[in-house]
């Protein structure tokens, strides 16, 4: 079974702190994704990566950056956390090229609260 | 901009009822439509639909796609309390890695 793990289930940080959210997948997937999920807004894509050291902006990249130094690991970075970044963060991975018919596999999520 | 609209946003039914969840979409160069179930943790994959009129089925769950009218439905028969979850619909366009998600339908099944 594909396993996508996230470093923390719950995280509480203060405004202005630098925050790292880590995601690891164990199935050698090329593609990895970071979403945030908010009530009434659904899942929104922040960033994704289709290869090591490659990254592309999603729909809401402002205030975030990412790092992918190894194939299995994709990190989401909040350079200076703000209260409006309080949310559930979900990581996902998939294999295959752009036109492949492959689903994304999700991690359990990190609920981040910024005070 | 791709768009996915799910309805209803929430639904409460009794065990044993049959429910139909709706997903309409607007996407340039449609590739596939996916359904996920999200309980307390990670969304789990249910179905991927690419062709009109072909029903996908897994136990009490089934789904079908209408590419002409740009919608899909997810049916759950003989609902159980374990079906309580948020059901997410997503679409993918050709040549893209991304999925665009709807806001989800929250289903509550009461005994």
Image (cartoon, rainbow, N blue to C red):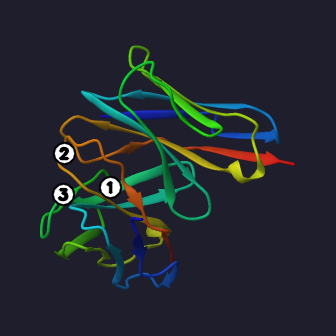
Give the class, few, some or many, for how many residues have Cα within 10 Å of label 1's Cα (few <14, many ≥20).
Answer: few
Give above or below for B52 relative to A100: above
Give above or below for A60 relative to B6: below
Distance in Å between CA atoms under marks 2 and 1: 21 Å
Q: Which residue is mark 1?
A: A60
| Near-viewer residue (A108 or A11) | A108
Q: Give the foreground label among 2 and 1.
A: 2
Q: What percent of the width, then of the height, locates residue A95? A: 25, 56
Distance in Å between CA atoms under marks 3 and 1: 11 Å
In the rendered structure, the residue with mark 2 lies on which chain? A
In the rendered structure, the residue with mark 3 lies on which chain? A
Give above or below for B3 relative to A33: above
Q: Residue at x 41, y 74 (%)?
A: A5
Q: Residue at x 48, y 69 (%)?
A: A109
In the rendered structure, the residue with mark 1 lies on which chain? A
Question: Of the numbered discs in the image, which one, if any, rests on residue A98?
Answer: 2
User: Which residue of the protein is positioned furthest toward the left in this rendering?
Assistant: A53
**Do tags 2 and 3 sit on the same chain?**
yes
Q: Earlier in the sequence, mark 2 or mark 3?
A: 3
Give the class, few, some or many, for how many residues have Cα within 10 Å of label 2's Cα (few <14, many ≥20).
Answer: some
Q: Which residue is mark 3?
A: A56
Under circle 1, the secondary element is loop
| Near-viewer residue (B6 or B94) | B94
Q: Give the foreground label among 2 and 3.
A: 2
Q: What percent of the width, then of the height, locates residue B33? A: 40, 35
């Amino acid at each position: 079974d594909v396993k996508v793990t996230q470093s923390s289930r719950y995280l509480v940080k203060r405004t202005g702190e630098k925050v790292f959210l880590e995601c690891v997948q164990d199935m050698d997937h090329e593609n990895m994704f970071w979403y945030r999920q908010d009530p009434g807004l659904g899942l929104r894509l922040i960033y994704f990566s289709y290869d090591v050291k490659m990254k592309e902006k999603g729909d809401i990249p402002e205030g975030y950056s990412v790092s992918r130094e190894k194939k299995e690991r994709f990190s989401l970075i909040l350079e200076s956390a703000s209260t409006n970044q309080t949310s559930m963060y979900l990581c996902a991975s998939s294999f295959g090229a752009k036109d492949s018919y492959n689903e994304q596999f999700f991690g359990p999520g990190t609920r981040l609260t910024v005070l | 901009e791709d768009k996915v609209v799910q309805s209803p946003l929430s639904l409460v039914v009794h065990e044993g009822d049959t429910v139909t969840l709706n997903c309409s979409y607007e996407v340039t160069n449609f590739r596939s439509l996916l359904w996920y179930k999200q309980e307390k943790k990670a969304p789990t994959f249910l179905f991927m639909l690419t062709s009109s009129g072909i029903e996908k089925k897994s136990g009490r769950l089934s789904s079908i796609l209408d590419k002409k009218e740009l919608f899909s439905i997810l049916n759950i028969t003989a609902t159980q309390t374990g079906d309580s979850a948020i059901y997410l619909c997503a679409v993918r366009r050709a040549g893209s890695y991304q999925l665009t998600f709807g806001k989800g339908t929250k289903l509550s099944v009461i005994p």
